[in-house]
Amino acid sequence: MRETIELLLSAGSGTEALRRLLTWHRQQNSKYSYAWIAKQLGLSSKGHIADILSGRRVLVPRLWEPCLAMMGVKGFPLKYCRLLLEIEQSIDAGEDVDPARYEHLEALRKSLQGEIHRASDRLVTHQLILQIHSVFGLYKNRPTRRELIQFFGRQHAIEVDHALQILISEGMVIRLNDHYQLKDEARHVMVLGPQPELSKVLDFLKQGLDQSKLAMDTWATQRDLACFRSAHVSVRKEAYIKQLDSLRDEMLRMQNEMATEDGDMLIRIDYQIYPVGEKGVPGS
């Protein structure tokens, strides 16, 4: 996964990304011969693949998805590469590209950067460490130990020190004299993609719900600063699944758009959408 993401982020276009991925897989696994790849894609000539890798030809759009699936590209890397290819196709056709597509591409790029430098299990499941990671943006990415302890409270001083040491040991934070600084590639770490042990992920999510319940009395009535909502909606399953995928992308885009190194407020985002029951399925 890491190699795939690094290859995608280093590519200047969708076509270049496909070439790099195919070349890398050929170097790693002998089964990725020209003949084998051509067979998987339903092409009659292995020379077609050689031409694609040499830049003499491009892969036709109908083969983008089969080619990426053949190499095991899925999730955010798949969406990123597909969007790269679609934007490139529009440019080659002389069409104007909707600015929103570039914004979506940038949001996906940031999430992939975070994937490369994903936190270990203890980072994902340790609330204070994740909060400290986010708080750097309130201090232009250069907080001092004193500022962090002042923010979280002196009663948490030992925990703050421990969290900072973990962030440093994970290669996410460096110390510059009295200041701590997040490395560029560690600024977009999120709880996405390959998951740690399921029980730890569930504990992390449940802690978030418990904290939300405590915050509700204070913030639920302050509509200019907070949003709490609960609803039951009758839906068509196929449409629901499609919209759920779009919502994930939109939430990611919103988070990346708001995130800044010059913040003055730390916010929390929790959301849950799940089936309550299904027609024709008793007790679902």
Image (cartoon, rainbow, N blue to C red):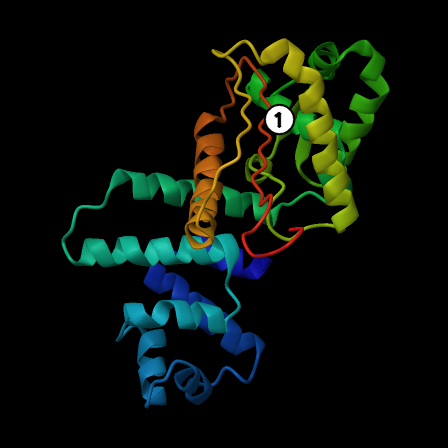
Q: Position of residue 149 (x, y in %)?
A: 75, 14
Above or below, 82 relative to 211:
below
Which secondary structure lies at badge 1?
Answer: helix
Q: Is residue 277 left or right of residue 21?
A: right
| Number of residues whose C-alpha sits closer than 10 Å to that of mark 1, classed few (under 14), some (14–19) or many (20 or more) | many
- Reading the image, the residue beneath label 1 is 134
Kindly identify the residue that appears in the image at 27 percent across and 39 percent down: 99
Kindly identify the residue that appears in the image at 36 percent across and 63 percent down: 16
Above or below, 177 relative to 274:
above
Q: Can residue 13 be seen by looking at this rendering?
A: no
Most foreground residue, 31 or 218: 218
Q: Is residue 238 left or right of residue 13?
A: right
Above or below, 197 relative to 57:
above
Q: Is residue 61 left or right of residue 26?
A: left
Q: Position of residue 156 (x, y in %)?
A: 82, 17
Q: Is residue 156 left or right of residue 260?
A: right
Q: Position of residue 193 (x, y in %)?
A: 60, 50
Extreme left residue here?
A: 94
Kindly identify the residue that appears in the image at 74 percent across and 15 percent down: 152
Most foreground residue, 44 or 50: 44
Most foreground residue, 16 or 40: 40
Above or below, 91 relative to 153:
below
